[in-house]
Amino acid sequence: MAIENVYSYLEYLALTVDQLADAVIEREEETAVYETRLHEMNEALIAAQKAADLAEGRAQLAEAKAAKADEKIEELSLMLKSAKQSKKAKDIQIDLFAAPSAPAPAPVPVATKSHKVANDENALILAKKLDSTIDKVQKLIREARA
């Protein structure tokens, strides 16, 4: 019986060695999967870092452009203020409603009524244009004072 016990023990050892070999192979496969995942994650991390660096560079560039734009706005606003002040100092307001400096020429006598109708229509057109011009001038005066 001792030989039978040795054979059964050897079979047990062979079975155990096979199980250990299978476990080692399984562990190596898991390790290979983990290494592959780790490599993929490292690549993703590197890509994310590059994207973050690129985004940070863009943000800094945008901040620099915004700062330049703010400086330009300040410069232009100062130029505009100085131009308005110098314009106010240079411009002498003309009184549009003051008495004329030279007398108006005498009107030409109208010979017929047909001319009178045409002249009346022309006078109405000119009066409308004058009203429009006066409104525009008053608007410009109000804007200049503001």
Image: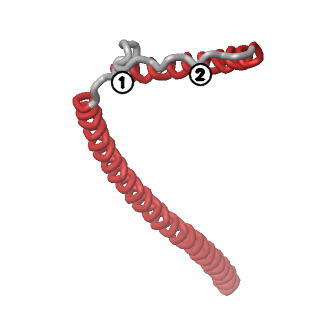
Q: Amino acid at mark 2?
A: Lys
- In the rendered structure, which disc, 1 or 2, sits on the residue that comes first in sequence? 2
Q: Position of residue 39 (x, y in %)?
A: 51, 71
Q: Secondary structure at mark 1?
A: helix
Q: Nearer the viewer, residue 69 or 77?
A: 77
Question: Which image quadrant is residue 122 in?
Answer: top right
Q: Is residue 54 left or right of residue 128?
A: left
Residue 42 visible in the snapshot: yes
Above or below, comparing residue 40 to residue 70 in the picture: below
**Residue in the image at 61% along x and 74% along y:** 29
Q: Nearer the viewer, residue 114 or 53?
A: 114
Q: Where is residue 106 drawn, in percent x and y? A: 50, 17
Look at the picture and state if 105 lies above or below 17: above
**Image disc number at residue 129:** 2
**Could you say whether the residue bearing mark 2 is in a helix, strand or loop?**
helix
Relative side of 36 to 139, left or right: right
User: Can you say which quadrant of the picture contains the N terminus?
Assistant: bottom right
- Kind of residue at disc 1: Ala
Residue underneath mark 1: 144
